[in-house]
Image (cartoon, coloured by chain):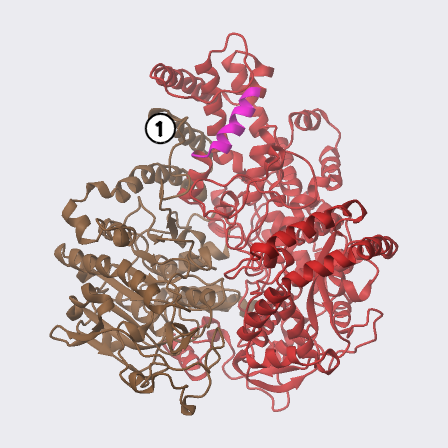
Amino acid sequence: MEFALNRIKAVCLASMVCGLMLPTAIAEPATETKPAKDKFRADQRRYWAFQPLNPPSAPRVADSAWVRNPIDAFVLAKLEEKSLKPGPQADKITLLRRAHFDLTGVPPTLAEVDAFLADASPNAYEKVVDQLLASPKYGERWARHWLDLARFAESDGFRADEVRPNAWRYRDYVIRAFNSDKPYNRFVQEQIAGDEMWPDDLEAHVATAFNRHYPDEYNAQNLRQRRQQILDDVTDTTGAVFMGLTFECARCHDHKFDPILHSDYYRLQAFFSNVSSDDEFPMLSKADYSEYQRKLGIWQGKTAEIRAEMQKLLTAARTKSRKARYMAYVDEVQQALDKPLPERSPIELWMADKAKYFMNATDESLAAGLKGEAKDQWKKLQAELDKFKDLHPGQVPKGTGLTELTATPIPTHVLSAGAYNRPLDEVQPGVLQILQPGPAKLEPVASGSTGRRTALAKWLTAEDNPLTARVMANRIWHYHFGRGIVASPSDFGRMGERRTHPELLDWLAKEFVKNGWSMKQLHRIIMTSNTYRQSSNYRSDAAEKDPENRLLWRYHRHRLESEAVRDTALSVAGVLNPAMYGPSVRPPLPKGMPDGAWKTSPDEADQRRRSIYTFIRRNNLYPMLDVFDMPDTHLSCGRRGETTTAPQALTYLNNEQTIDWAAKLAGQVLQQAGSDPSKQVELVYRMAYSRQPNNSEKDTALTFFRQHQTILEERVKAGGKVVTPATKVAGVSTEQAAVLVDFCHAIFNSSEFVYIN
Amino acid sequence: MDMTEQHNEAWRSRRDFLRRTSGLGGLALSSLLAADALSAAPSKEVNPLAMKAPHHAPKAKSVIWLFMEGGPSHIDTFDPKPMLEKLAGQPLPASFGKPVTAMGTANNTLMPSKRKWKQYGQSGTWVSDWYNHVAQHADDLAVVRSCWADGLNHVGSVCQMNTGSILGGRPSMGAWTLYGLGAANQDLPAFVVLADEKPVTGGPKNWSSGFLPGTYQGTLFRRDGAPILYLDTPETVGAKQQRSKLDLIGKLNRQFSQQKEDDTDLQARLNSYELAYRMQSAAPEAVDLTQESEATKKLYGMDEERTAKYGSNLLLARRLVERGVRFVEAYCGSGSLWDAHTDMEGNHSKWCGASDKPIAGLLTDLKARGLLDETLVVWGGEFGRTPFNEQGDGRDHNPWGFTIWMAGGGIKPGQTLGTTDEIGLRAVDRPVHVHDIHATILHLLGLNHLDLTYMHNGRAERPTIVSGNLIKELYS
């Protein structure tokens, strides 16, 4: 052991293995040396993640009665190897809540609980799974998982953190894609190259925003560096999300553990070398857009003179502003801007295109600086212009995504130590050389771009691609069980987690592809297995052999994610606004947030939308979501944290919003259960936990009712405020109603409320 | 060897490795388990902020980082450059090349400092008349004049000074410290950020836990009202009522935990409500400056308008470290207000003025209370400023050479380390990178930056990424 440890240190010091002591080095066969001509070691060539899918048939098991579908056979076989028994099936209510949370992110309603309990048919549960998969709430739940991977946000990050006003269209696209069960291969193609492959399909263009969600600094002075940062983000994210590989380790040198060469990093990057953000494409069909332009042309014709006059007023300010911004750029950018369009090289075109947004101050901002006579003149002209308002066809709805400015690609070089200004050899687009050593085959595309991304999209979704289906099947498993078969869903490499059920993973991936890459079909197979239906109860005998439940002898209890916690509270309170889609909403911020983080949505109903519609500002995440481990959006997130902290408690405890929701729940309870405290407690339990309280729980509640009533009576007597429901019910005093509100509020803060059991 | 097996081997070895190599083994192990397995294993740690053994005997228990945000000019504060007098009004000599600056000012002429300079104390440390009060502590300071960083803009550079990287997403030094050492006071956030003016440039990513568990992130204390979001009980809820409600929550949670005793997450959740409750009283007590004497307040400049804000933050910082808070970052001029692209005189007169007396007061106060020995005080910005002018009377950003200083917490005081070139443009002798500063701070806290690792996306990440050398002269 001493020797092994020394060896790691030696490896690290010699090669500056990212300066780290990486213990896996111990496991490397010490004697194996690289063959002279092969860039890869034999063990790298044999590594499972790069092998074709090869699922064996479902294994034989002793307890064949437990096997409902092949998943169970694979899981049970592993359990039996260790003489472990699977857990009993969870009770009906637990199963129903689990399915609802899992597929929709909110608990079942009273009616749904009653209907399920009343359904004695053998396939009652299967019917529920099908109903939930057909519910539009499914897309709202599962799109959020994808948005984690896409590092989705609606602002740039960096200092200015400028808003991306059309980013929400991508969120809607993902919800629709999940709800319509868009085949995953098509979905991937749209993410990577929707604009090239379906140039007339606006949704496919919106899909390319997947790689537009990078953090960005729009006023950066060094555009070549900015471009490199963007490309690095796109490369890292694409590698992690679709291939489950940590490409970023190969940005500066060959990956130390996985067969990703330094040049592989830039081969992958080269697929994207020509991309440019396309932030304002019209979300109109060609016909509608030409009709729009016709109308706009009429308005432009009638107002040409007025507008020309107005522009004259701004000329001086515009020139000055342009000059100042021009001067801020490094020489290289200034030179690009100085050249006439046809003379610009592809990179100069890219830089000039980016500079455009920074250099062009808006009319409004320039006009705001006008003074004296010019200001009066501007106002007068503006009033003139306003007379033609009725002729103006209004703002075009706009989308954001990617495009390419030219069919001539910007060359991609391997970069020494990843530095944008230290290019080494030029590379052509290509996939991992361990899988396909030559450059990618490019074919012309209709959209007038390079076709590079189309080639990547087709490779990723080829039926024999060993990575894509496995990675996604594992992700879906991860979200269902709280832990993937590979527990590091974005790292299938050797430093990632070891597979717990290799054959099952291959079987799932194959099944996924066989079923036309249908995600809903995969959910159905997983959720109807006996493996998924197991109780989460602890068994000491099993825990002794497998303390971390890697072999799945029980269901893994876990906390709801931030969005689901909030949505559940809104839903149980009966105030969740089910409106779908559209620009994001801004619920109220707590006291103490920075001024200007955002303006609360004026329509109160917008403050009660599902959390997926909450505006995502990179530098100021919504505190109620942030506090429960919402990803920070600067990097793709394949597995969320699951922390338990005091600020989480404070956020739901001392929050006027959650108290208000509790009052709403209390109001419903009063209306339906009347003045009998015992009936009130029962109804709260049924609404919040989908079950009846047991006697001891009822006792606890009623004791609280009595004691708390005394406290509140004293408080009211002393002139203190209490929160009561809007509804008044005969025989219930103010204090009693306020007790019920506090009881409901405590329920919102309870563990049972926020755990999938 | 079958790859699956081999991988398994590696996985087990990692645990072995961590167990054997350092005192951090237990910590890293449990964190790995927490990160690896979201399952409810009985071995899982309940309180990730429990005190942990350092790697070696620490010299400092806490850090107070005085962050002059926007870039204080080193050549007008701690790094005098007489040569600039001679070259005043001339362009940058060709031998210096043409640096790419934030505002494209490298063709502008050189601008000498207008300050009066003196050497102070036994050490003879040079300090300009913008820092007259701090100068009285010259023999407490270790001034490093040869710092350099990678970023050109505020957001990247502030981020790097906090996290090591100009791009967001990595843990800040405060988060690494908590990950390594845990919290000494369980009733208060252990990593606190104080801002005096506008929001800190780049926002929360500067005190983020990055890929570390969220519990290690810094807590921004708000200036007005409650220092923590949702700390105050709403006015519709009385104290007895709150306690009664919390008792009920405790009972509900215990009822749910029955038959689930193995689930330490549920136990942690129970604890989190009690901690929240304690924090509700502990945090307001900690931030209550009315408990301090008038003399103390005066010491920090709280009686003068221009020093009142930063002074009250530094007094608060002292109260926090006194109560066991590990890491306090006190931003001065938050929101890039030291960013003197024009009017150096006006800008720095204001911000040096705002910080001089409070900083001197803090050092005096810490010393008087015997806290300076165990509190590392760090002064600096995200970069310095250029020797050439911008718009006639300002200076541009300078990440190639700038000054920080440290005091207390095991620092060998009364020394000046490293030099910049004759005009203060670049660090030339004994250059010190941001990563070196980080490695040294962690070292003083008892942590070895090479051993403080966390597995993330297949890499054992550490605070200094791939670099970091200890600045040994500062403490030995």
Q: Residue A733 versus residue A299: which sits nearer the camera?
A: A299
- The picture places residue B151, in percent across and down from the top left corner, at 45, 72
Please tell me whether residue A39 is drawn above or below residue A730 in the rendered image.
below
- Quarter of the picture holding the N terminus of chain B: bottom right
Q: Residues within 10 Å of mark 1 (few under 14, many from 20)?
A: some
Please tell me whether residue A494 is drawn above or below residue A433 in the rendered image.
above
For the colour brown, the matching chain is: B
Q: Quadrant of residue B208?
A: bottom left
Q: Residue B342 versus residue A57: which sits nearer the camera?
A: B342
Most extreme residue toward the front is A373
User: What's under tag 1, amino acid-wise?
Assistant: Arg
Q: State the predominant SS element of the stretch in magenta.
A: helix
Q: Which residue is mark 1?
A: B243
Most extreme residue toward the left is B122
How many numbered marks are there? 1
- The picture places residue B292, in percent across and down from the top left corner, at 18, 44
| Left or right of A524 in this view: B356 | left
| Left or right of A694 in this view: A10 | left
- Quarter of the picture holding the C terminus of chain B: bottom left
Residue A656 colored magenta?
yes
Residue B108 colored magenta?
no
| Left or right of B159 in this view: A154 | right
Q: From this viewpoint, is residue A339 visible?
A: yes
For the colour red, the matching chain is: A
Q: Residue at x 42, y 30 (%)?
A: B249
Q: Secondary structure at mark 1?
A: helix
- The picture places residue A734, in percent across and down from the top left corner, at 46, 14
Callout 1: chain: B
Q: Which residues are magenta?
A: A654-667
